[in-house]
Image (spheres, rainbow, N blue to C red):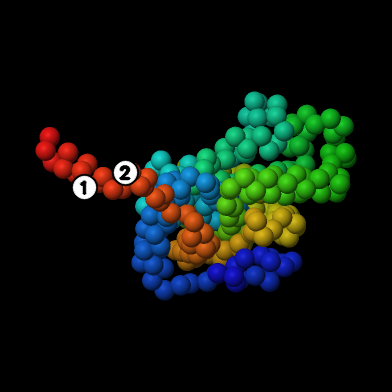
Amino acid sequence: MKDYKVTTSIALKKIETKVVINESKKELKNIRRQLGELQDKLYAHGKYAVLVCLQGMDTAGKDSLIREVFKDFNARGVVVHSFKVPTALELKHDYLWRHYIALPARGKFGVFNRTHYENVLVTRVHPEYVLGENIPNINSTDDIDIHFWNKRFEHINNFEKHIADSGTLIFKFFLNLSKSEQKNRLLRRLNKPNKNWKFSPGDLKERQLWDTYQACYEEAINKTSKPHAPWYIIPADDKPTARLLVAKIMLQALSAYPEIKEPELDDKIKVNIETYKKQLHNE
């Protein structure tokens, strides 16, 4: 899975958006079962949490990926958060606050469907959104310069380093969708009555800003892919393959932590197991 991890500076235009793995659906069933079993061990071990961050252009397949990859998890072992436009309460705090309070507890997986990176992506493309945060000394978009964005990258790196040091294992996946495939998926939303509800005219306005978004993603990935919080660029034009790759990357990385296992029984309990069995049988 090293082919997908960002370890050096990348240029998104040079990275493939479509890879097709045969039998990907069948292989995914096996891997997600193993992930489900691993989550049980993670919960019993109780010292690590896992944070899965999903980013990508609209229609990249984030929702369906979550549904398919985490299907075999205990429902109580994974919590999904989808970050929309900040609420009035969230805007009264710093921009990372709502992400801090949504972090997974030790023993659980947390999935951020869109993430804290929206604060250097959507707001970078639409800097007027920052004005709603009521930040001191930011009175107009003219005050939002390169120094402002570099500070945000620093904040994000510090945030991720802090939670990693505290036992959160971080996976950041960019679902790398081509513009032509996005067009096809938007058309499917319009052509299928049961998918119409997913479409918004705003989708087309944002599509016109495709190149700007790609440049912002590229910079964000290059500035924040760290050993403790790496980015993985996943070719997303083929959904089954994208799901499989995400699942395989997580399983491979988490399997490198042999200490994540069920705790040993207390010796006094262990030696009396047969006694407890007899006690129950004799009720």
Kindly tell me whether residue 199 is visible in this rendering. Answer: no
Give the secondary structure at mark 2.
helix
- Vertical placement of residue 176 versus 194, above or below: below
In the image, residue 26 lies at what x, y percent? Answer: 36, 66
- Residue beneath disc 2: 269
> What residue do we see at 39% from left, 43% from top?
75
Nearest the viewer among 164 and 180 is 164
Give the secondary structure at mark 1.
helix
Name the residue type under label 1: Glu
Extreme residue in the bottom direction: 22
Nearest the viewer among 76 and 62 is 76
In the image, residue 107 lies at what x, y percent? Answer: 48, 45
- Residue beneath disc 1: 274
In the image, residue 236 lies at what x, y percent? Answer: 54, 63
- Vertical placement of residue 12 versus 173, above or below: below
Residue 135 in the figure: left or right of residue 221: right
In the image, residue 39 lies at what x, y percent? Answer: 43, 51
The CA span between labels 2 and 1 is 10 Å
Name the residue type under label 2: Ile
> What residue do we see at 61% from left, 63% from top?
233
Nearest the viewer among 5 and 242 is 5
